[in-house]
Amino acid sequence: MPDGTTVKAEFIILGDEFSTEMITEMLNIAPTEVYHKGDLSKANRPRGETCWSISNIENNDKPAIYLDYDTINFASEIGATINFDYYIYS
């Protein structure tokens, strides 16, 4: 068994239709995955929603979450909900 903790962090924004470019610009972070409602999935089926996401895997790091005022305000403006799930395996 490896020493330390491995943490996988994901931040996903899902919705009917929205500008993924605007999310990238507002957060100033490049996504690791983007798709739009109607795009074909790997299974060749149309996507039912739009998605903007980032994910990262870190070793021996403790997860921390920080949302600044602008991010919280933006989430409120678009009627978003925010959910954090921790799955830490050590």
Image (cartoon, rainbow, N blue to C red):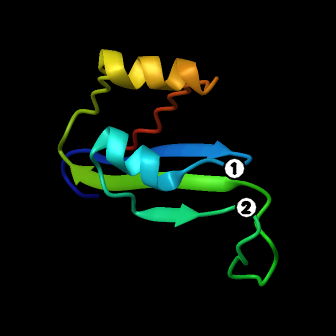
For this view, does 63 lie left or right of residue 15? left
Q: Closer to the camera, 8 or 22?
A: 22
Q: Vertically, is 26 above or below 21?
A: above
Which residue corresponds to mark 2?
37
Q: Quadrant of the C terminus?
A: top left
What amino acid type should be assigned to the residue bearing mark 1?
Glu
Q: Residue at x 82, y 77 (%)?
A: 45
For this view, does 89 lie left or right of residue 49? left
Q: Closer to the camera, 53 or 86?
A: 53
Contact check, label 2 and label 1, Cβ < 8 Å: yes
Q: Residue at x 29, y 20 (%)?
A: 68
Calculate the distance from the C-alpha at mark 2 to the C-alpha at mark 1.
Answer: 6 Å
Q: Residue at x 40, y 63 (%)?
A: 32
What amino acid type should be assigned to the residue bearing mark 2?
Lys
For this view, does 49 lie left or right of residue 19? right
Work out whether residue 85 can be spotted: yes
Which residue corresponds to mark 1?
17
Residue 28 quadrant = top left
Counting other residues with Cα less than 10 Å from the Cα at mark 2, is it few (<14), some (14-19), or many (20 or more)?
some
Residue 82 image point, x, y percent = 55, 25
